[in-house]
Image: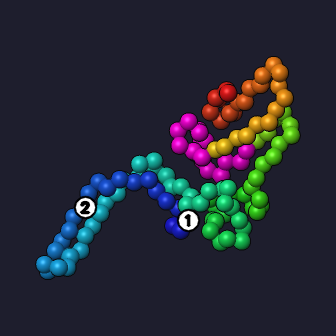
Amino acid sequence: MPGKKYAVYCTENAIDFKTPTFGTFSIKFSVIKGYSESLRETDKFSLSSGEWQFETGVLSVDDVKYKHNTTGFKIYNGSTDTIDPHIRHKFRLLINIDAPKGFTLTNNTTGDVF
């Protein structure tokens, strides 16, 4: 399906030589994660690009950027993956706050508290 990628590893491969310089080959892959991922990231999202499939769960707005001035906020996750910046996900959060007694940041999906 266009617009999707899979994390895979090769489980089997074979070459059937028809002549000394020509052959056919077959490759068998196993999907490591068991699901596909989008080729694009939501920080580069644009409705006019034609690179998005709406069944992939992306928002139907053209600007997915955030600036919050509240004590609570949500960040859109356009996938079914749990976003965990400790592992591999690209996530950058800049906080400019006046908190003399400190503050906590809670990821309600993973339960992490920072």
**As drawn, 56 above or below 71:** below
Q: Residue at x 31, y 60 (%)?
A: 28
Q: Say which of 80 and 84 sits in front.
A: 84
Q: Nearer the viewer, residue 13 or 113?
A: 113
Query: Going 71% across and 65% down the picture, which residue do you hit?
Result: 46
Range covered by the magenta-colored residues:
75-90
Give the image location of residue 107, x and y in percent.
68, 33
Task: Say whether residue 16 is left or right of residue 83.
Answer: left
Please, what is the dominant secondary structure of the magenta stretch? loop
- Residue 80 part of the magenta segment: yes
Of all residues, the one furthest to the left in this rendering is 20
Q: Is residue 57 visible?
A: no
Instruction: Tell me which corner region of the image, top left, top right, bottom left or bottom right, holds residue 39.
Output: bottom right
Q: Is residue 64 visible?
A: yes
Which residue type carries mark 2?
Asn
108 displayed left or right of 73:
left
**Sequence-first disc among 1 and 2:** 1
Residue furthest to the top:
101
Disc 1 and disc 2: Cα gap in Å?
26 Å
Residue hosting label 1: 3
Q: Quadrant of residue 20?
A: bottom left
Q: Is residue 28 left or right of residue 23?
A: right
